[in-house]
Amino acid sequence: MSDTITSSSASGAPSRVTLHLGHLPSKKDIKAPWPRTPTRVDPNNPPWPAYRGYHEYSFAHATMQSRLPTILGKAIEDATRTLNNQSSEEEVIDLVQCIDRMGELMTDLSGNAKLRPIVDDNEADVALWNKEIAKYFQGKDFMNAPWLFAEAYKYRRLHECFSVSKFWRNYDVFYRQKNDTFSRSSDAVFELSMRFAETFKIPEELSQAEKLEAERLMFLELTQVCLWGNSTDLSLLINMTEDQIKSLQSTGGDHLAATEKNILGNDLTRLWETVQDLREKTGGRIDFVLDNAGFELYCDCVYADFLLQSGLATQIRFHGKRFPWFVSDVTKKDWEWLLNSLAYGQLFPNATDVELESLRRLGMRWKQYEKEGKWVYEQHPFWCTGYTFWDLHSEAPDLFLHLSRSDLVIFKGDLNHRKLTYDCAAPASTPFEVAIGPMASAAGAPKVASLRTIKSDVVVGLGPDGDRIAEKLDQTEVGWKISGKYAVVLLSEGRPGEKVRFA
């Protein structure tokens, strides 16, 4: 029927048979169905194609090839600066070894080395990291692993450089940078502190409908302040002038009105209806999964203060990172630094007495919220793993159960949005609730809001016309996905009230 070619071994038996299939139908160009079915989704195979460092058209490539080595280089400079101020021989030698380990990480990152297991440094996340590496990323390197995992792995390796040391376990190579950026943010800081130093009051002479409308408008403006406060992301804006910072952080009313048109997926009205409903049910708990320290955290606190004062919430829980993460993410030290700097600090030497008093009042009020348990800061190990939030319910069931008891969980910023959506090439028209998978569909999933200025490739939730909107922006504004000019405010209703079930 078809020709065969054989080659004989020493025994005379054919060692290989090759069939010629010239009379069979030609191979078809079959497109893989997207998204993948849930059983085929795993960290190396997201629901839609993953962004990987070797994709030269993507921001993933720019990050893995250029941004991460630059960030690591600045981290080495910071540690060296600290080293030069030490006097204890033991501490100097210990820090030199930390810097040597950072050099080894730079070699691995620049040389695209394979991803090795995390050293056991007594952190609670080691088993999660090494299970994921062993199961999904054996033999993978920095450029061919999914970008989100490879980038997170780099920051975990950076922490390991210090966590195995004797004296420098809690050292933050980004701490100076975070504090310095906030101290150069005076205009935006005082714009808010001068408005909110006193507890806000809606004029009594207004009718009930007018009071509600005034409150609604304040909520919408402060939600935007909370959203656009994310513009200051140190991992993206490594060298900023003071004028650039002021431009990014403009919080005046006219500026906010102009920027709302840049919110491409806009659930602001639904978000207002959600928190209003909370108050009618005697108030509730709202959780913030934090993003950046400094000015963004300050905006988050102003927003949370308003939610408490207005009765839209009775308790706010803030979720930060256990160690330095993605340059500017909030740690417990950043949280304490902000509140204490506002209450007691001297960050702004050119400020007036009135401006400084406005900061002091904010800081003291917020510290009082902590004492009363109205504000609670938390840091679960899962937030610093390589897993996306699609795996939160299976890999951190205690955290999922904890969040399921919240009335609303607000995820701030680009990294949290990437983890919610599996950071993959889903169409822009993909509904948010589809894109976040189990965080919307699992039993007990809380209401989830994502407040995100767009700074990376993944974009979802733009509505039925979303693909056309994204395509038009691709043609007219190259780089719109990484500029921070556009944003989304997206809401998932989740499945609150249902009993949480774990496999």
Image (cartoon, grey):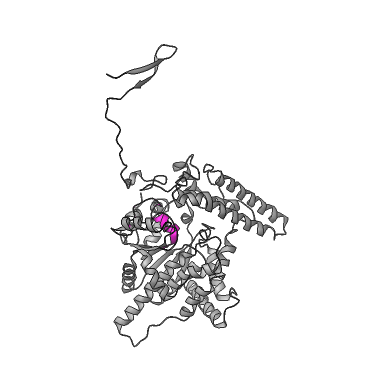
Between residues 164 and 50, which one lies in front from this camera angle? Answer: 50
Check the picture and name the quadrant holding the N terminus: top left
Query: Looking at the image, how many numbered discs can be counted on the residues?
Result: 0
Tell which of 78 and 310 is nearer to you. Answer: 78
Q: Nearer the viewer, residue 447 or 293?
A: 293
Residue 408 in percent (x, y) is at 37, 65
- Confirm whether the magenta stretch covers residue 243: no
Q: Is residue 419 magenta?
A: yes
Q: Position of residue 434 (x, y in %)?
A: 32, 54
Res. 443 visible in picture: no
Residue 497 as seen in the image, left or right of residue 228: left
Does residue 329 sit above or below 125 in this rendering?
below
Query: Residue at 46% of width from left, 79% of height from top?
Result: 195
Which residue is the extreme one toward the front? 476
The magenta stretch is: 411-431
- Outermost residue to the bottom: 205
Q: Position of residue 38 (x, y in %)?
A: 33, 47
Determine if residue 487 is in view. Answer: yes
Front residue of 69 and 116 = 69
Residue sitting at 43 percent across and 11 percent down? 11
Measured as percent of width and height from the top left, residue 99 is found at 64, 52
Residue 466, located in which quarter of the rendered image? bottom left
